[in-house]
Amino acid sequence: MTVTQQMTKWKLRGTGYEFCNCVPGCTCNFSGFPSSADGSCKAFVGNFIDEGFCGDVNLSGVKAIGIFDWPKAIHDGGGKVVFVVEPETTEEQIGCLAQIYTGQLGGNPWAILGTTYEVAGLVKARITLEGSGLALTLNAEGVGKGVGDNFKNPVTGEPHEAQITLPDGFIWQKGDCGVGSFSAKAEGLNHNFKDSNWILYDFDWAHDK
């Protein structure tokens, strides 16, 4: 007799703040391979969860950041990640996020991404956001910071709007693109990149079967 495992239902809906070391626009979204100088994928990605749950655990209002380090393309694996959550995040909430972000509970994008890295650590730090639109700063106190801005028209200096639409995107379907810089240092990972990719997007992820 075949036994079907019943996975815990979960949902995360909110805003994503993605800084990585690709050139702006991130060729991973098109060809699957990084446009960074060394072919690696290093990133500082914030998830601000407006509405979320995992089983009976409420995840609404939780903020999390992932500091990612893949030596090559994401799908080649071998990556490491350090997660950052705020000090008041409960152990129940952390346990749920750990299962979601490592793909243990199924559901994209994490059922795919979670197979490409090992978790190098968890850090608790105050997470703040200053600014609006693409001109903002995402900060994990004492750990790392991402600073984003609009593209600028080379003639007038005015903000230059750019968007990427991915109808079949499994992380996001519409991203507002700009240029950013980020740095982060935690649990053996050390990133520092300037004038690289920065994308702002809404996410709506779930596993409800």
Image (cartoon, rainbow, N blue to C red):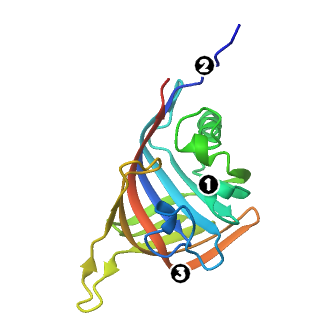
Q: Mark 3: give few (<14), some (14-19) or many (20+) Cα within 10 Å.
A: some
**Residue at disc 2, secondary structure:** loop
Q: Position of residue 162 (x, y in %)?
A: 31, 70
Answer with the quarter of the image where residue 188 lies: bottom right
Q: CA distance from mark 1 to mark 2?
A: 29 Å
Residue name at image x 70 percent, y 66 percent: 71
Residue name at image x 35 percent, y 49 percent: 167
Labels 1 and 3: the sequence-earlier one: 1
Comparing labels 3 and 2, the label whose residue is closer to the camera? 2
Comparing labels 1 and 2, the label whose residue is closer to the camera? 2
Can see residue 141? no
**Residue at disc 3, secondary structure:** strand
Can see residue 202? yes
Above or below, comparing residue 39 to residue 153 in the picture: above
Labels 3 and 2: the sequence-earlier one: 2
Q: Amino acid at mark 3?
A: Lys
Residue holding disc 2 = 6
Are the residues at dot 1 and dot 3 in contact (C-beta closer than 8 Å)? no
Above or below, comparing residue 116 to residue 1 in the picture: below
Residue holding disc 1 = 84
Answer with the quarter of the image where residue 40 lies: bottom right
Q: Position of residue 159 (x, y in %)?
A: 27, 79
- Tell which of 8 and 86 is nearer to you: 8
Residue name at image x 67 percent, y 65 percent: 72
Q: Which mark, by number, is residue 208?
A: none
Quadrant into which the N terminus falls: top right
Comparing labels 1 and 3, the label whose residue is closer to the camera? 3
Labels 1 and 2: the sequence-earlier one: 2
Q: Amino acid at mark 2?
A: Gln
Q: Which mark, by number, is residue 194?
A: 3
Q: CA distance from mark 1 to mark 3?
A: 21 Å
Q: Position of residue 133 (x, y in %)?
A: 32, 65
